Image: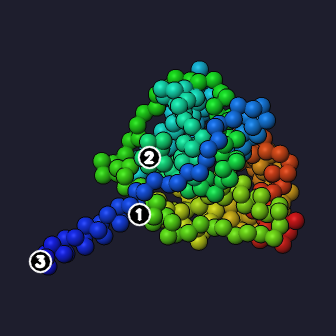
Amino acid sequence: MSKKIVTLSVISVFSAIILLWLFYPPTINVSDEVSSSDEEIEKGKYLVTAGGCISCHRGQTELTSETLAGGLGIETEFGTFYAPNITPDTSTGIGSWKAEDFIRALKHGRRPSGGFYYPSFPYRAYSKLSDEDILSMAAYLMSQEPVSMRIPDPETPIWLARWMIAGWNKLADLSGTPDEIYDDALLDRGAYLARNLGHCGECHTPRNGLGIPDHSREFAGAELGDEIIEPIDAVALIEWTANNFDIFLLLGLKPDGEFVGGDMNEVIEHNTSKLTDEDRDALAAFFTRHNSAGG
């Protein structure tokens, strides 16, 4: 066998390994069907609310504004991405999804077909949701009235193809994610709500030139399109107490007497103001944990 053939064989094997590493589909160990029980639907409704799904997925027409029919354009430096229809319409929504499709999408950023979602969808944060919570969310979403609403394709540069997200995901993996475990059930719950279900860092954490969150500056504020997202890290909240933060989540009122503006208004209205007292307390404890006055 010639040296050239050996070299080509080695390159081929190495290339195959790299491709498998990048594109191998995730293993989904879920055999359950999406539940239709009232208990799971009610639990899922709360989780969808706590997750702020309506902030992006709310319908953009007069007839669909109270639904999750999607259509909101999210402008980024990589293009404009339109929130999909997540009502159970079989043609334009998620009506044909199975339980495993919800796990695949929320935890792995993969479409039912196996293709990649763009990271404008916060699957990186959702990756640490429990399967149980995801399936409860699925139960609620599948219980809603289907809305036929076809959403535009993303408006991205010609060079930004979906398959490139395979490499982006691996680079994002290398950046790590905050995963502290606290010796306190309240802080653990607050971290789960802030970092995962509520995905606060998706807007409030700055990103590098590739759009990967810089977790060394978690919650330090960022830019989203033309909007400046305020910091909510330890430095920004140094004078906030847990009670201050609790009131902010409920009413949007800051300690200085000013009300929050911008898109955060909708987050307060549709998301944080509807949390249970216990979950608001958990978020407040988490965000003021560095402050000696936080308690």
Residue most toward the front?
1
When the figure is inspected, residue 211 is found, relative to residue 113, above or below; the finding is: below
When the figure is inspected, residue 274 is found, relative to residue 120, above or below; the finding is: above
Q: Secondary structure at mark 3?
A: loop
Q: Residue at x 35, y 61 (%)?
A: 19
The amino acid beneath tag 1 is: Trp
In the depicted view, which residue is nearer to us: 252 or 190? 190
For marks 2 and 3, the one nearer the N-term is 3
For marks 2 and 1, the one nearer the N-term is 1
Percent of width and height locating residue 208: 47, 65
The amino acid beneath tag 3 is: Ser
Q: Please tell me how many numbered marks the rendered image carries.
A: 3
Q: CA distance from mark 2 to mark 3?
A: 39 Å
In the depicted view, which residue is nearer to us: 19 or 148? 19
The amino acid beneath tag 2 is: Gly
Mark 3 lies on residue: 2
In the depicted view, which residue is nearer to us: 63 or 86? 86
Q: Secondary structure at mark 1?
A: helix
Q: CA distance from mark 3 to mark 1?
A: 29 Å
Q: Is residue 275 left or right of residue 220?
A: right
Residue most toward the top?
63
Percent of width and height locating residue 172: 49, 64
Q: Secondary structure at mark 2?
A: loop
In the image, which disc is placed on residue 114?
2
